[in-house]
Amino acid sequence: MTSSEPWDSGIDALELMAQQHVQIKDMLESVRDSAGDTREQRFYNLRLLLALHEAGEERVVHPQVRRELPSHDDHQVAERLSEELKIKDAVLMLEKMDMDSTQFESSFRALIKQVLSHFANEESVEWPLLRHGEDVATLRKLAEALRESERAASPRPHPGVEGSRANARMVSFVRMVDEARDRISGKHPERPADLS
């Protein structure tokens, strides 16, 4: 989900998020089915994509649900945010483990279940609320806001840490999420974003 990703500019926010969900599911399988340096690099890429995706949802999608839909649907946003927090906690625990250990493999399988359940809830509960409550033009504007937030939040390469192990361990998931949020909100000095 960097600026180099070929997302179709004519799709709406829900279609864009559905594409992202497919990409994340593929990456989950890729991490699960790999080992060693390859697993570490794939886990790093997965963490980055999850951080960008969730930060974009927090900045663009969840506020839209809260603004535009009846107040009784606010609990749906709270439930999704709670699920996202549990996923972040699981990723943080995984970061501290030996990625070739049985503990990592077991915990990673649990993360896959959490992510798939979260996606199913978004797709079956939150997205229909948006689809029903918003017109196509608004959903397309939301897609552009998501793309812009992801472009703003995408990290730069770091010279000197090209190796898989160094790169995969360099940035914690919390830092990735925080930096994505800062860049999306315009607080990051190098790449401010104005999404209003």
Image: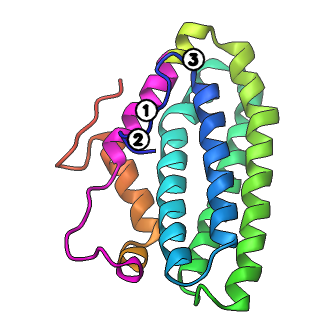
Whether pointer 1 and pointer 2 mark residues with C-beta atoms closer than 8 Å, the reply is: yes
Please check the rendered image and state whether residue 159 is part of the magenta-colored stretch, yes or no: yes
Q: Would you place residue 17 above or below residue 80 in this image?
A: above
Quadrant position of the C terminus in the picture? top left
Horizontally, residue 179 falls left or right of residue 84, namely left
The magenta segment is 141-166
Pointer 1 or 3: first along the chain: 3
Q: Residue 114: x and y, percent?
A: 76, 61
**Residue corresponding to mark 1:** 147
Q: How far is mark 1 from mark 3, CA to CA?
A: 12 Å
Q: How far is mark 3 from mark 2, CA to CA?
A: 16 Å
Name the kind of residue labelled 2 in the image. Answer: Glu
Q: Residue 85: x and y, percent?
A: 63, 60
**Residue corresponding to mark 2:** 150
Whether pointer 1 and pointer 3 mark residues with C-beta atoms closer than 8 Å, the reply is: no
Tell me which residue sits at (70%, 46%) in the image.
80
Name the kind of residue labelled 3 in the image. Answer: Leu
Tell me which residue sits at (60%, 79%) in the image.
93
Q: Would you place residue 41 above or below residue 193 in this image?
A: below
Tell me which residue sits at (54%, 85%) in the image.
96
Q: Nearer the viewer, residue 123 or 39?
A: 39
**Residue corresponding to mark 3:** 139
Q: Would you place residue 185 above or below residue 65 in this image?
A: below
Q: Which of 46 and 177 is in front in this view?
A: 46
Q: How far is mark 1 from mark 2, CA to CA?
A: 5 Å
Name the kind of residue labelled 1 in the image. Answer: Arg
